[in-house]
Amino acid sequence: MKRSFKKMLFSAAVLGLAGVVLAGCSSIQGDNKKAGKSDDGTETILMYKVGDKPADYDKYMEYVNEKMKDKLDVKLDIQYIGWGDYEEKMQVITSSGEDYDIAFADNFATNAQKGAYADLTELAPKYAKETYDNLDPAYIKGNTINGKLYAMGVNANSSAQIMLTFPKAVLDKHNLDISGIKTLADLEPLLEVIKEKEPELTPIAAGLNFRIGGDIDYVFDNNLPIGIDLHGDTSKIINPFDSSDTLKRDLKTMHDFYQKGYVPKDAATSNQEYALKENTWFARLETQGPFDYGDSLLTQAAGRELVSVPITMAVKNNTQARVANYVISSSSKKKEKALEVINLINTDSDLLTTMVYGLEGETWKKLDNNRMEVLDAYDATNVISGAWMTGDNSKIYINKNVTDEQVAQRDEVIANAEQSPLLGFNLDTSKIKTEIANISNVSNQYLSGLHTGTLDPDETIPEFNEKLKQAGMDKVLEEVQKQYDAFLKENK
């Protein structure tokens, strides 16, 4: 499923570059205690998580801390910071040197290079051995900077691919076949039918953050046009808008769709979400990984059957390795115990499933053979956190609706996914801070219009590329290429 938070935050590159010092850290949801000892003298491990504090927080934490006390003789204090505030508040916490133990990583590479996070290279294999040993190697490589491991990735979707997703009921109603869809252009016959026979549906759910682009792996993310073409010369850093024929083809397709009314007229500026549950859309882009079990989790979230076809290959890259990764503060006095907490969360299936689905017997029921059943009382908004950002997904009890074939397919995708040559590459931006900030500003003026098809790519791309050059694109490409060449040489 799509994990929008880290994928849409370009600040991982730019906030650190700007060197902005943020002030003011308002209320944090949780027990709101500093790391230390609890009232009964038990040592407390302080963890920051992104998201909203669940309504049943106290009840859940009573269960969690029974486990923590029994297994590790510690108490876990989870403090929540909302999605919209996490980036800014963690910047304050990191800059001020506030005492904490574990945190959901933010601005990972920059903060790791600044020394904000503890070096886990030797500690993790010793104090979180089971978790470390079970991690896909992509998580180790993706969270290693200058030869040192700074985060424990959540073992989940180590690879991902972009899918086109549809409501099955609508496909069945009009006898529409998606099996032959390989590119955006293949969608057109279906969109024609929907526009004519289902005028209340938006043919393509596109808005401000809609991004296409095929198999391009970006050095930062798809809001900064610097990366490699996975179908081309992967040793060359490119501006995709200048060098990728696939991207240009898809942008032309989107513009054609826009002109034919398949894309909302206000898509380039719209924040409409097109919720999965709502019968308001026909086709949408979704990011899926192996632990989504095909369309199983999408269907569960939507409350109706959704089906998808891939339009990119499955790739292991830095984005996936860092979608959900946990760091330990370099100032923590309890690094070893914090790793033991991470290890327990990632290895105790009852604990992990409870953190993801709520209390056993209330919102889920354990079945045989590591299976579970989600009960009617389950509410995805009232849990400690989602599977993708909690712990090792291979240790969570599998929903009974997931077939053995889907489990086998999961393992096959993990085994066969391509590894991007950029995996583990960390750019030193010290010589190109200004240029990257300028390129970001230029990109913000054009990307939404181009990706939604609002702007004509034949007219706009030359203008866009010229402004990118004026912003310093040539200097940036040269510097990134220089560092990437050294990286490839070191990692032969």
Image: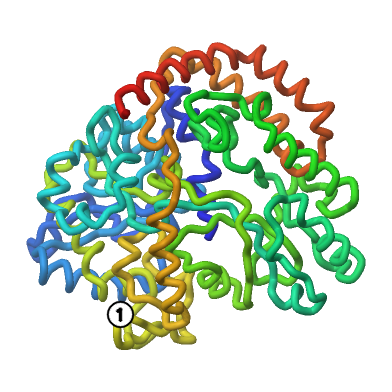
Q: Secondary structure at mark 1?
A: loop
Quadrant in the picture for residue 250: top right
Dot 1 crowding, Cα within 10 Å, few <14, some 14–19, many 20+ = few
Which residue occupies the foreground of this view, 166 or 348? 166
Residue 450 location, quadrant? top right
Q: Quadrant of residue 128?
A: bottom left
Which residue is at a point 41% across and 70% down the rendered structure image?
Answer: 408
Left-right relation of 35 to 136? left
Determine if residue 117 is in view: yes
**Image quadrant containing the C terminus:** top left
- Residue 247 in the image: above or below residue 48: above
Residue type marked 1: Asn
Q: At 65% from the left edge and 26% from the top edge, which residue is drawn? A: 243
Left or right: residue 189 compared with residue 205? right
**On the rendered structure, is 3 left or right of 371?**
right
Q: Position of residue 37 (x, y in %)?
A: 12, 56
Residue on which the image places disc 1? 370
Q: Position of residue 331 (x, y in %)?
A: 18, 37
The image shows residue 324 at horizontal and vertical percentages of 38, 51
Say if 31 sits above or below 349 in the image.
Answer: above
In depth, the one of 430 and 214 nearer the eye is 214
Nearer to us in this view, 254 or 245: 245
Q: Position of residue 33 (x, y in %)?
A: 24, 54
Name the residue at 82% across, 35% down.
455
